Image (tube, rainbow, N blue to C red):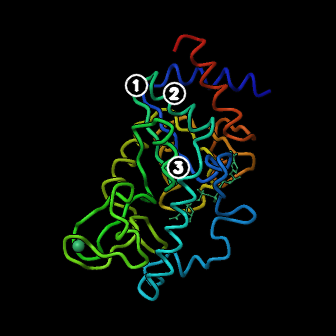
Amino acid sequence: MDDRKIGQVADLLQRAVSVVAFTGAGISAESGVPTFRDNNGLWEGYDPMKVATPEGFKEDPRTVWRFYHKRRQQAQQVKPNPAHLALAELESIRNNFLIITQNIDGLHQQAGSKNVIELHGSLFKARCTKCSCQLDLNSCSQEILSDEPSCPKCNSLLRPAVVWFYEPLPEEEFSAAMESADNCDLMFSIGTSAEVHPAASFVWQAKANGAVIVEINPKPTAASQIADISFRIAAGEILPKIVEQYKSIGQ
Ligand code: OAD
Ligand code: ZN
C-alpha cells in the first residue's frame, strides 16, 4: 500500500517546481525529543503558562531561563534522525526545496539543511528585551548562560529568542513562509498536529493555492481532511524511502 504511495510522491516530487516541508515536533520524536501533545509531553511538569508566555517571563525570568537552558542542553545531546537526514538530502539534490519548521531544536540544520525557516525561533538564540541585540548561545560567554542574563550592549534582561503563547510569529519568517506556501506545488506536513495557528495555516494556504498536500504522521490530524496523500507511519521510516525512490527515477 505504502509502496504505491511512495511511487506517487516520488512522481510528484519530480514534477513539482517548488516543494515545501512543514514540520513539527513529531519529526524530532525519533531523535528522543518529546512532542507537545503526546503523553509525557515536552512541558514535563512545567506549566506552559509560566514558562512559555510573556507574562510568565515577566513574573519569573529565572525559572523561564532555567527551563530553556535545560531544553537547550537536551537538544545538544540528541542527533538528527533519518527523517531530518532525508529532508537534508532532498535539499541537496533538487532546487526550490524549503523547510518551514515549528521546531526550535535546530535538528534540521544539524542534519545539513540550509533552507530552513524557524517560525517559532530557536533554543540556540537569545534576544534583548529592550534593544535589537541578538545572541547566538552556541558562541557566547558562560556569563550569558546564567539564569538572569543581561544584554552585552545595553545591560537589559535577555530573553530566549522563541515565540511564546500570545506572541505573533516573527515578521520576516512569517512573510517568507507565506510566500513559499502560496507558491509551492507540493507541501509535506510532517510530524505536526497542525492545531497551532497561525503556523499550521500554511498547510491550508498551500492547499488553497493548488498545492498537493502529503501528510506524514502515525495519527490523523487537523490537516488530514485536506491531505491528498497520508502516510500513517513514523517520519523516519518513510521519508528515506521516498527520497530513495525519487533518486531512482532520475529526479
Ligand atoms: P504536537 O505535539 O502538537 O504534535 C506532534 C505530532 O507528531 C502528533 O500529531 C504526533 O502524532 C506526531 N508524531 C509523533 N511521532 C511521530 C513520528 N515519529 N513521525 C511523524 N509524526 C509523529 O507538536 P506540533 O504540531 O509541533 O509552539 O506543535 C505545534 C506547536 O505547539 C509547537 O511549535 C509549540 C506548541 O505550542 C510554540 O511553542 C509556539
Ligand atoms: Zn540590549
- Pick whichever of labels 2 and 1 is earlier in the sequence: 2
Q: Is the C-beta of the residue carrying label 2 under 8 Å from the nearest atom of ligand 1?
A: no
Q: Which residue is mark 3?
A: 204
Which SS class for mark 3?
helix
Q: Position of residue 216 (x, y in %)?
A: 66, 41
- Pick whichever of labels 3 and 1 is earlier in the sequence: 1
As drawn, 236 above or below 169: above
Q: Residue at x 61, y 37 (%)?
A: 83
Q: Of 24 and 220, which appears nearest the observer?
A: 24
* Neighbours of disc 1 within 10 Å: few (<14), some (14-19), many (20+): few
Task: Specify the farthest residue to the right.
Answer: 1
Q: Of 59 and 233, which appears nearest the observer?
A: 59
- Pick whichever of labels 2 and 3 is earlier in the sequence: 2
Q: Position of residue 103 (x, y in %)?
A: 52, 54
* Neighbours of disc 2 within 10 Å: few (<14), some (14-19), many (20+): some
Q: Which residue is mark 1?
A: 95
Q: Position of residue 180 (x, y in %)?
A: 39, 41
Q: Quadrant of the N terminus?
A: top right
Q: Position of residue 76 (x, y in %)?
A: 53, 53
Which SS class for mark 1?
loop
Q: Nearer the viewer, mark 2 or mark 1?
A: 2
Q: Which mark is residue 89?
A: 2
